[in-house]
């Protein structure tokens, strides 16, 4: 989830949390008044009440966002690998992953800022650190026990670091107010954490830009623990292989391309944009309406360069073959005019309402040839009238340019990575699992710079269920 997605989740929750926090503040205030009337000697200042109220509000928002707004979809997963989030963000080269790391710190900055306002005892570093650790560990445990999240050491680290940043910030403000001038030492300490992350991400960007090839999302942030895992290999693995071809597609991870297609469909089909584009993981999404006010969504997938334009709602209709052929002429000409449809695609009609264009190339041919090629498909459900936006247009036509031959590791070397647990799986292996590897084959996948890299696909079963994983094949990757 990116920052925009987080904010869109938070805003609907804010009124509820405000009401709950206001009610709690009222209860606390009445209890305090009753306590004072009964002769209680402890006094609280307006600042302490305000800080207490804001902390209640903050805690409610954090719990809503991290726990109660999620479904119970997790099975008590834990991740004790510190900094695995950085490796995951690096492998995917994902803006939303990097944003999430920063947000996990920013989310706890109010805690470190407000705790010292509760009283003198909380103005020291140690109490703030201990309270921050207790709260973030408590949240992680609640997520795990309620199956609404994963207990992650990364989250504890970033949450606590964010609280410390908030504490250093309020200390810099206090010290500067006391001296009636800027306290450079305190301000310098408060800026240490933000500057460290600026340097970290700037360095990562510099390293990334200096590389020819991009990063592969198939690389695991955490290796599988293979202790107690039984592996049964039922395929022969060659130990020597020939070099294979490397390709590149300039439409992958290319926001300019995604925006250009968005502008093209908007202009071609007289669509009006309702709002700015938003981010959802690897997707960039635009919202449109047609001339009749019907809503349309355009979705560009950064990871694979595919995009989709679809109308929301409307009844499914079946068209005669003659009418479909007529629609084919219009939409096919439109794609050809904008260099979107290779000449040797194969056309077909599906389900009496869908136009489809396909072009395929075998992996063996990809690996051996040294020429540019296209593969993929286009599926289109036409509108009732030509020149209107189609009801659904799914475009996944890749045009790959030949780069050069590259050396690859052998299937036997790739399988050694499987044995070492160096492969990606959504759910971790557990002791006693039986993994049967039935087949291996060469395949291709896109990296974060659009290079079409060779990989090995291993398939088989895990405890009787279908299983597969991809292992990078380039020997210098």
Image (tube, rainbow, N blue to C red):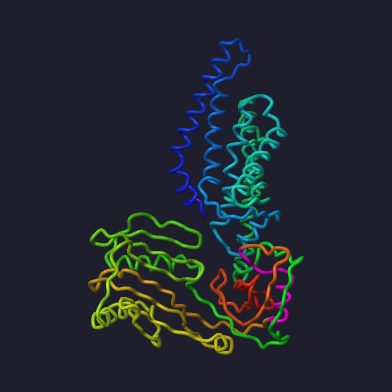
The image quarter in which residue 209 lies:
bottom right
Q: Position of residue 221 (x, y in %)?
A: 66, 62
Residue name at image x 62 percent, y 67 percent: 210
Residue furthest right as drawn: 227
Q: Position of residue 249 (x, y in %)?
A: 50, 76
Q: Is residue 312 left or right of residue 398?
A: left
Q: Quadrant of the C terminus?
A: bottom right
Q: Please state the horizontal and vertical placement of residue 381, each as a whole percent of the image.
A: 32, 73
Side (left or right) of 14 relative to 217: left
Lateral position of residue 299 relative to residue 102, left or right? left
Residue drawn at 60 percent across, 41 percent down:
108
Give the magenta range: 409-426
Observer-nearest residue: 366 or 207? Answer: 366
Magenta run includes residue 414: yes
Percent across and percent down for residue 335 are 34, 78
* Residue 116 appearing in the image: yes
**Quadrant of residue 110 within the rendered picture:** top right
Task: Out of 249 and 70, give the one closest to the viewer.
Answer: 70
Residue 451 position (above or below residue 9): below
Depth check: 43 or 181 in front?
43
Q: Is residue 444 magenta?
A: no
- Picture residue at 57% right of the left edge, 13% below the top: 36
Q: Mark yes or no: residue 190 visible.
A: no
């Amino acid at each position: 989830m990116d920052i925009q997605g987080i904010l869109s989740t938070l805003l609907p929750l804010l009124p509820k949390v405000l009401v709950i926090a206001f009610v709690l503040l009222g209860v606390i205030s009445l209890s305090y008044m009753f306590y004072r009337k009964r002769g209680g000697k402890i006094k609280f200042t307006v600042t302490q009440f305000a800080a207490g109220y804001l902390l209640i509000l903050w805690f409610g928002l954090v719990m809503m966002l991290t726990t109660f707004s999620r479904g119970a979809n997790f099975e008590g997963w834990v991740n004790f690998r510190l900094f695995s989030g950085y490796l995951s963000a690096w492998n995917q080269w994902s803006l939303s992953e990097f944003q999430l790391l920063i947000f996990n710190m920013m989310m706890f900055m109010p805690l470190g800022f407000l705790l010292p306002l509760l009283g003198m005892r909380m103005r020291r570093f140690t109490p703030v650190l201990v309270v921050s650790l207790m709260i973030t560990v408590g949240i992680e445990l609640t997520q795990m026990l309620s199956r609404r999240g994963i207990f992650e050491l990364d989250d504890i680290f970033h949450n606590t670091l964010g609280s410390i940043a908030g504490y250093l910030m309020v200390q810099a403000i206090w010290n500067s107010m006391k001296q009636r001038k800027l306290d450079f030492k305190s301000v310098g300490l408060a800026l240490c954490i933000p500057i460290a992350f600026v340097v970290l991400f700037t360095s990562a960007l510099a390293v990334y830009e200096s590389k020819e090839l991009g990063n592969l999302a198939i690389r695991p942030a955490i290796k599988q623990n293979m202790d107690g895992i039984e592996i049964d290999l039922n395929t022969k693995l060659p130990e020597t292989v020939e070099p294979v071809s490397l390709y590149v597609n300039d439409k992958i991870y290319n926001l300019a391309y995604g925006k250009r297609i968005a502008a093209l469909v908007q202009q071609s089909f007289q669509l009006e944009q309702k709002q700015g584009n938003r981010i959802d993981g690897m997707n960039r999404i635009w919202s449109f309406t047609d001339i009749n006010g019907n809503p349309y969504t355009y979705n560009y997938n950064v990871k694979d360069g595919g995009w989709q334009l679809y109308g929301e709602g409307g009844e499914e209709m079946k068209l005669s073959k003659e009418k479909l052929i007529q629609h084919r002429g219009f939409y096919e000409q439109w794609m050809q005019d904008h260099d979107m449809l290779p000449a040797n695609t194969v056309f077909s009609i599906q389900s009496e309402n869908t136009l489809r264009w396909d072009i395929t190339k075998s992996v063996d041919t990809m690996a051996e040839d040294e020429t540019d090629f296209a593969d993929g498909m286009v599926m289109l459900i036409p509108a009732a009238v030509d020149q209107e936006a189609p009801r659904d247009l799914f475009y996944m036509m890749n045009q790959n340019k030949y780069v050069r031959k590259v050396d690859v590791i052998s299937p036997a070397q790739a399988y050694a990575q499987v044995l070492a647990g160096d492969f990606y799986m959504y759910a971790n292996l557990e002791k006693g699992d039986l993994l049967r590897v039935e087949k291996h084959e060469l395949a291709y996948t896109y990296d974060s710079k659009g290079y079409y890299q060779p990989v090995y696909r291993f398939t088989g079963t895990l405890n009787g269920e279908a299983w597969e994983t991809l292992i990078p094949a380039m020997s210098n990757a």
